Image (cartoon, grey):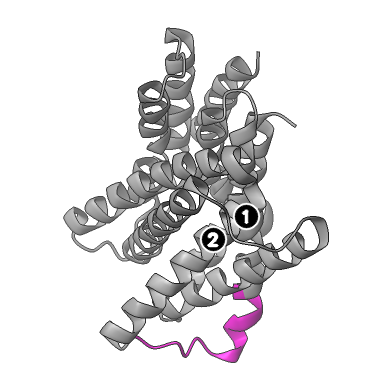
C-alpha cells in the first residue's frame, strides 16, 4: 500500500471521528471524551501488537521520538477538540487541514526532495478542502470569538504535522506498532496529568461510551496508518492525504446525516482529488 493510500484511509477514519466530535462536544466534557478515545486507541494498539509482533517498548532513539510524537499528538487532539467545540467548521477545518504545508517543510528540512509540482498539488488539496469546509452550512451553530478558535486550530495543525513526522521517523527506526503504542501511552499520561491539575470531569455518561469507543478505534487505525508510511517512499504524502479528513467529514455528513453539499463544494472535492491524483503519479 502506498503512503497516499494510507493517508486516505486515515482521512476516512478521522472524518467519521470528527462527525462524532461535532455532536458529542455539545454534551460531553472534552477532556473526558479525549481520555476515553485515547484509552480505547491504546487498547486497540496493544491488541494489534500482541497478535502480530512482540509486545515491547521502542528502543533507542525511537523511544524518545515516539514520546515526542505522543506529546505532539495530545497537543493536536486538544486543539482539535476545543476548536471544533467553538466552531464553526468552515473556519476550523481549513486551518487544521493546512498542516501538510508544515509536513512538507519538515520533510524538506530532513533531506526529502520536494518538487514544485508536488507543492502545487498540496496547495490544490488544501484549497479544495478549504472550499468544501468554508462553504459548509453551519448557520445554526453558535459562533464565539474567532481569535481563540483560530489559535486553537493553528496549534492543532502544528501538532499533527510534528506528530506524523516524529512518529514516522520512529517507525522507520523500530516499527510503526511500537512507535504508535508509545505515543499513545505518552499522550494518555500527559492528559491524566492535565485532568488532575484542572480537576476536569471524566463523567461522559453511559450514552456516550459506545460512540467514544468507536471513535477510539477509528483514531487508532488512522494514526497507525499515517505512522506506517514512515517505511514507505514519500512518507510525507500520507500526512498530506490524511488532511482530507475535513472534506470527508462533510461528505460523510451528506451521506449519513443528509446534510446538503452545494455545487461549489463538489468542485472543491474534485480539485482536492486532482491534487491527490497528481501526487499518486
Specify the label residue 243 is tagged with: none
User: Which quadrant would the C terminus be assigned to in this image?
Assistant: top right
Q: Residue at x 38, y 41 (%)?
A: 94
Q: Please tell me how crowded label 1 is: few (under 14), some (14-19), or many (20+) other residues with Cα within 10 Å.
A: many
Q: Where is residue 246 in the image (x, y as percent from the top left)?
A: 50, 45
Relative image position of residue 59 (x, y in whole percent): 56, 52
Viewer-proximal residue among 263 and 60: 60
Crowd rating for badge 2 (residues with CA inside 10 Å; few <14, some 14–19, many 20+): many
Residue at 40% over, 79% down: 192
Question: Does 281 lie within the magenta span?
Answer: no
Q: Find the magenta span and give its range.
A: 200-212
Dots 1, 2 in contact, CB < 8 A: yes
Marks 1 and 2, how far apart at CA? 6 Å
Residue 204 counted in the magenta span: yes
The residue lying at 20 percent from left, 58 percent from top is: 148
Q: In which quarter of the image is residue 146?
A: bottom left
Amino acid at each position: 500500500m502506498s503512503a497516499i493510500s494510507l493517508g486516505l484511509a486515515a482521512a476516512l477514519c478521522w472524518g467519521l471521528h470528527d462527525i462524532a466530535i461535532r455532536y458529542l462536544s455539545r454534551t460531553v466534557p472534552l477532556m473526558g471524551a479525549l481520555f476515553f478515545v485515547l484509552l480505547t486507541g491504546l487498547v486497540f494498539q496493544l491488541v494489534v501488537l500482541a497478535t502480530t509482533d512482540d509486545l515491547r517498548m521502542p528502543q533507542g532513539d525511537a523511544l524518545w521520538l515516539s514520546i515526542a510524537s505522543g506529546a505532539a499528538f495530545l497537543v493536536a487532539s486538544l486543539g482539535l477538540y476545543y476548536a471544533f467545540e467553538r466552531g464553526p467548521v468552515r473556519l476550523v477545518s481549513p486551518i487544521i487541514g493546512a498542516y501538510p504545508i508544515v509536513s512538507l517543510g519538515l520533510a524538506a528540512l530532513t533531506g526529502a526532495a520536494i518538487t514544485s509540482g508536488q507543492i502545487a498539488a498540496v496547495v490544490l488539496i488544501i484549497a479544495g478542502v478549504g472550499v468544501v469546509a468554508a462553504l459548509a452550512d453551519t448557520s445554526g451553530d453558535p459562533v464565539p470569538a474567532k481569535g481563540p478558535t483560530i489559535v486553537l486550530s493553528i496549534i492543532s495543525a502544528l501538532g499533527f504535522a510534528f506528530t506524523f513526522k516524529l512518529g514516522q521517523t520512529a517507525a522507520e527506526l523500530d516499527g510503526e506498532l511500537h512507535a504508535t503504542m508509545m505515543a499513545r501511552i505518552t499522550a494518555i499520561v500527559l492528559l491524566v496529568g492535565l485532568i488532575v491539575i484542572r480537576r476536569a470531569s471524566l463523567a461522559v455518561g453511559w450514552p456516550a461510551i459506545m460512540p467514544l469507543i468507536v471513535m477510539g478505534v477509528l483514531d487508532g487505525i488512522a494514526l497507525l496508518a499515517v505512522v506506517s508510511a514512515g517505511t514507505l517512499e514519500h512518507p510525507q504524502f500520507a500526512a498530506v492525504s490524511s488532511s482530507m479528513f475535513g472534506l470527508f467529514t462533510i461528505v460523510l455528513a451528506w451521506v449519513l446525516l443528509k446534510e446538503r453539499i452545494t455545487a461549489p463544494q463538489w468542485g472543491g472535492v474534485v480539485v482536492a482529488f486532482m491534487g491527490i491524483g497528481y501526487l499518486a503519479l
